[in-house]
Image (spheres, rainbow, N blue to C red):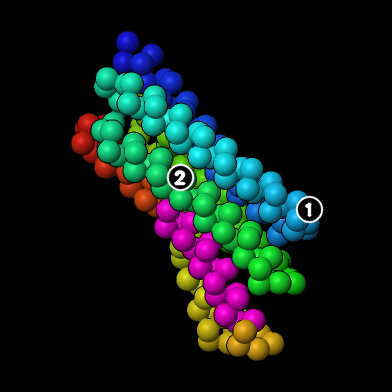
Amino acid sequence: MSGRADAPLIRALRSQVTVAASGADLTCALLNGAVDMDVARARMESIEHDGDDRRAALLAILGATLSPPVDREDLNRVSRSIDDVLDTLRDFVRETDLYRVGDLSRYRDLATLVSGSIRTLDEAVAALAPGSDLRAATLAARKAAGAVVRAYQYEVAALLTGGTPERDAAEAMKARELYRRLGDVGLRLGDAADGLADGAMKRGR
């Protein structure tokens, strides 16, 4: 009975993660030149609104669930962090346009790490189902998010120590801000993974 009751909630949370993954995929497509800026901005706005709808649906199901697989506050924390991931990706795409950045290729590797980390988080959310190894799945999600943050730190260190040549200080400032956006995605993914981990610990899973 518990497994059947948990299923709609897990589906709703994974649906929210799926939308965040779509935002990451669109970001990668922009950085790879597969879509142009106008298309990317319009699609990202649509994806972000879809993410808001998915979060609202998740909260409605959570409010109607008598005994969720982990504590409500932890699930809400996970959902809120996923929403923050999508908001930050939207801001990244918007700012690449506002800053008139010509070469986006430098952000490809970090964006690819972000995309992979979101998919690892999805596996952790799926592990909320009874009989799954939630602790192992959340540990993997935390490690993936940490890899994003470390990669961001390395990129900024190279930028500030002259490892990456820049035309002028303004270009370096643009790059730092955009790297920071992707680094913030890693932090939010880490928050989501921590929420799952805390919930797993409270329930002894």
Highlighted range, magenta:
171-188
Is the magenta region chiefly helix, strand or loop?
A: helix
At 60% from the left edge and 76% from the top edge, which residue is drawn?
174
182 sits to left or right of 95: left
Label 2 and label 1: CA atoms lie apart by 25 Å
19 sits to left or right of 30: left
Mark 1 and mark 2 in contact (Cβ < 8 Å)? no
Please identify the residue farthest to the top as the structure is shown.
Answer: 1
Q: Is residue 109 placed above or below 13 in the rendered structure? A: below
195 sits to left or right of 173: left
At 60% from the left edge and 57% from the top edge, which residue is drawn?
111
The quadrant the C terminus occupies is top left
Q: Secondary structure at mark 2?
A: helix
Residue 34's disc number: 1
Q: Is residue 159 placed above or below 42 in the rendered structure? A: below
At label 2, which amino acid type do we have?
Ile
Quarter occupied by residue 155:
bottom right
Q: Is residue 14 placed above or below 23 in the rendered structure? A: above
Quarter occupied by residue 8:
top left
At label 1, which amino acid type do we have?
Ala
Q: Is residue 138 visible?
A: no
Closer to the camera in the image, 134 or 57: 57
The percent coordinates of residue 80 (x first, y second) are 40, 44
At 72% from the left edge and 56% from the top edge, which residue is drawn?
30
The percent coordinates of residue 185 (x first, y second) are 49, 56
Residue assigned mark 2: 82
Instruction: Tell me if residue 95 is in the magenta stretch.
Output: no
At 43% from the left edge and 30% from the top edge, which residue is drawn?
58
Quarter occupied by residue 202:
top left
Of label 2 and label 1, which has the lower sequence position? Answer: 1
